Image (cartoon, helix red, strand yellow):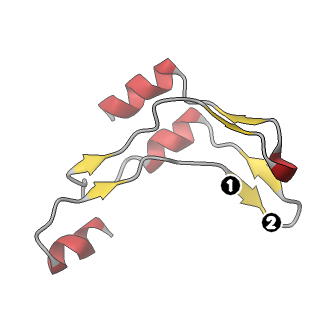
Amino acid sequence: MVQCIRDKCPILIEAGGGIGVWVKYETFELILPTDEEKLNLLNIKPEPDMLTVNMGTFDFSIGRYGGVTFRNDVNYQRRAIQA
């Protein structure tokens, strides 16, 4: 995707590093990725000019997904920034 954008226009490209929760649509079960899965998804080639990183933990306490915590602890944040 990054290369397609670069081929069409000379802009700075920022990719989102907000790797979130997946939903199993048959059961509406939330699937939380591991830190390793999140880091692997940040390995974007070719690299964008900038990458956002979620710097904190999120609480999905709404509706049917109440009580689900998406952790972005300090160790993960450090690894994501260095990736």
| Three-letter amino acid code at the position of disc 1 | Trp
Percent x, y of residue 73: 54, 23
Task: Say what secondary structure mark 1 lies in.
Answer: strand
**Residue furthest out toward the left:** 10
Q: Is residue 47 visible?
A: yes
Where does label 2 land, which residue?
A: 25
In the rendered view, would you say 80 is above or below 33? above
Which residue is rendered at x = 46% and y = 37% of the image? 54
Q: Residues within 10 Å of mark 1 (few under 14, many from 20)?
A: few
Residue at 46% across, 49% down = 41
State which quarter of the image contains the C terminus: top left
Q: What residue is at 46 percent from the left and 40 percent from the top? A: 39
Asked if residue 78 lies left or right of residue 18, the reply is left
Q: Measuring from the top left, give residue 9's x and y in whole percent.
A: 14, 76
Q: Spatial distance from mark 1 to mark 2, Cα to Cα?
A: 9 Å
Which residue position holds label 1?
22
